[in-house]
Structures are given as C-alpha cells and as structure tokens.
C-alpha cells in the first residue's frame, strides 16, 4: 500500500471513502482497533465539514516517521469560505449549521496533533496527527 | 445502501451496516418513523454492532430517531455500541443523553418487553401516542 493518499471530497460517499482509506492506512502502520476508530471518526468529521461548508476539498493521508516515531498525518484542505473566528469555532457547541458544534474541538481531543489555519474568503486547512504508542 | 428493517411482533429491528453515508442514515430515520406508524410498533431497536464510525452526524440521527419515535408512542433502544465506539464518542464529546441503550439485541428486546408488557397485559390500555412521556426517551439532551 502506498504511504500517501489524496482523496477528493465532494459528497457524503467521499466522506465514507476517506475514512475507510484512513482506517486501512492506519492498520498498515500498526495502529490498534481503538486508534483506528479514533482516526476514522476524525476524518469523518473533517470531511463532513468540507462538504457542508466548502462544498469541495481534499483529504490527504500520509504515513510519517519522525525520529523513532511513526504515525499518520491527515490534512483536510478546502478553498471554501474559511472561518472568521477560529477560536470560536474551536469551542464545544459552536455551530453555524445547527449541528452539535463538536466536530473541530472533538477532533482535537481525539488526535495527538491538531493545527488549523483558516482565512475568511480563502479556505481552511486542518492538519491532524496520530502517533503510534511504543 | 439500505438498512434492513425487520418487523418482529410489536417491535421493529433496524440493523445498521458497517459503512453508511449520511443519506443512508437519513433514509433509515425516515423509514423507521414511517413504519412505526404503519405497524403501530411499540418499540424500535437500532442495532449498530457492525457500524465503523459513530460521528456527530450519526449520533444526532440516532437521537432524532429515538425522540421522533417517542413522540409516536414507541420506545427506541440502541444496541451494540462496541467499546471502541463508546470510547471515541466520549472523547468527541458526544452523548446519547435521553436515549436508551443496551448491550446487544437480546438485552434490547428484554428492555422493550419489560417496558411494554404491563400495558399489553392490561389489554386495552388508555395510553395513546400523545400520552405522557415515558421514562427516558423523552428527556431531550442538551445540544
Ligand atoms: N471547512 C470549513 N469551512 C468553513 N467553515 C467551517 C469549516 N469547518 C468548520 N467550519 C465552521 O466552524 C463551525 C464549527 O465546526 P464543527 O465541526 O466544530 O461543528 P459543526 O460542523 O457546526 O457541527 P458538528 O460537527 O458537531 O456536526 C461550523 O459550524 C462552521 O461555521
Ligand atoms: Mg462539523
């Protein structure tokens, strides 16, 4: 299996595909079942945000090795409307779509690394990482 | 992909497959609400044993199903949330507050039987679908 993948996100089918690919790649890296579920769920949330708010974007999955750490890095990128107030979007319960407002803050709790960059009118990039426990 | 819904006596059993799109989930919700009315079901079991991910959207759909069928006089119980899913849901901050859950299908059926038996035994019960909320399914979770 390739150690990097890029999945175009346009519909709810793509959300499914992205999380399945993430699970497969994660398994090949050696993540345990619980971590695979965390990873798939995080991808599901980010991919749904793309479909919902930006209409389209991509999810990139990459196996990385840093020092003696191995892990999975996931980047969700779109050129949609962006987020005006990122700090607010990161708060539990904040939603502009009548959702639970748990996607972004929840994903941060699920993963080991979380970075978000967003500019109004430009788009949003969320990069998350999960490291293998040794 | 369709969610098979099985009618078993006064109950409906929906078995959710591993990978469902948002549209599939919405379709399942529609079908269950419709069938509860059609068959005058007293209870609904949603079996998520095979489900790979219960994210915020899926969780919201399950809560909607429980609340909507509740308003139609049927109790809903979610069964088969395996440990990985439960762990992930807690981390994500998701809750099934106000929704009954049981370990597996067998326990789900036992739960529904226990809830519906007294009324069946009494025969013609005065309860109707607009009756008072019964324990559990009507307590709306905070959003
Ligand atoms: N890719 C994106 N582009 C533009 N806005 C976004 C994007 N992702 C998130 N947002 C904004 O941030 C808010 C919070 O996102 P978050 O995923 O936490 O919650 P939600 O999508 O509203 O609800 P939930 O994910 O719980 O169903 C969204 O309501 C939306 O306004
Ligand atoms: Mg979201």
Image (tube, coloured by chain):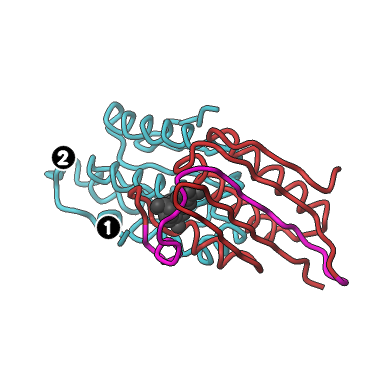
Residue displayed at 30% across by 40% down: B42
Say whether residue B11 is magenta.
Answer: no
Q: Position of residue A33 (x, y in %)?
A: 71, 58
Residue displayed at 45% across by 41% down: A52
Indicate whether B109 appears above or below B33.
below
Instruction: Tell me the red chain.
Output: A
Q: How many numbered discs, if any?
A: 2
Observer-nearest of A21 and A64: A64
Crowd class of label 2 (few under 14; some 14 to 19; many from 20; radius 10 Å)? few
Residue displayed at 15% across by 45% down: B127
For mark 1, give the secondary structure: loop
Residue displayed at 53% across by 35% down: A12
Q: Position of residue B118 (x, y in %)?
A: 25, 51
Crowd class of label 1 (few under 14; some 14 to 19; many from 20; radius 10 Å)? some
Q: Chain of mark 2?
A: B
Which residue carries the number 2 mark?
B124
Left or right: where A24 falls relative to A108: right
- Same chain for mark 2 and mark 1? The answer is yes
Magenta residues span A67-94
Say whether residue A71 is magenta.
Answer: yes
Which residue carries the number 1 mark?
B140
For mark 2, give the secondary structure: loop
Q: Chain of mark 1?
A: B
Instruction: Tell me the cyan chain.
Output: B
Q: Nearer the viewer, mark 2 or mark 1?
A: 1
Q: Quadrant of the N terminus of chain A?
A: top right
Indicate whether B21 appears above or below B91.
above
Q: Quadrant of the C terminus of chain A?
A: bottom right
Quote the CA–CA distance across marks 2 and 1: 29 Å
Observer-nearest of B137 and A19: A19
Q: Position of residue A59 (x, y in %)?
A: 65, 45
């Amino acid at each position: 299996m390739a150690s990097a993948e890029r999945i175009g996100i346009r519909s709810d089918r793509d959300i499914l595909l992205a999380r399945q690919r993430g699970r497969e790649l994660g398994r090949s890296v050696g993540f345990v079942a619980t971590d695979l579920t965390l990873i798939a769920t995080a991808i599901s949330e980010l991919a749904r945000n793309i479909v919902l708010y930006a209409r389209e974007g991509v999810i990139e999955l990459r196996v990385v090795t840093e020092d003696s750490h191995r892990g999975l890095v996931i980047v969700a990128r779109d050129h949609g409307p962006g987020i005006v107030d990122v700090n607010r979007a990161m708060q539990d319960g904040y939603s502009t779509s009548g959702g639970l407002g748990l996607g972004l803050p929840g994903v941060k709790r699920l993963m080991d690394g979380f970075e978000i960059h967003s500019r109004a009118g430009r788009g949003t990039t969320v990069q998350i990482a999960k490291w293998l426990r040794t | 992909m369709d969610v098979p819904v099985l009618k078993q006596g006064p109950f409906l059993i929906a078995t959710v497959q591993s990978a469902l799109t948002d549209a599939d989930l919405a379709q399942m919700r529609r079908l269950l609400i419709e069938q509860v009315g059609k068959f005058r079901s007293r209870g609904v079991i949603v079996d998520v044993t095979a489900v790979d991910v219960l994210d915020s959207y899926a969780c919201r759909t399950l809560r909607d199903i429980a609340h909507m069928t509740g308003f139609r006089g049927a109790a809903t119980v979610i069964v088969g949330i395996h440990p990985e899913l439960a762990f992930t849901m807690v981390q994500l901050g998701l809750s099934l507050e106000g929704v009954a859950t049981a370990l597996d299908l067998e326990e789900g059926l036992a739960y529904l039987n226990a809830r519906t038996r007294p009324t069946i035994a009494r025969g013609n019960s005065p309860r109707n679908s607009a009756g008072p909320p019964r324990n559990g399914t009507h307590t709306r979770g905070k959003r």
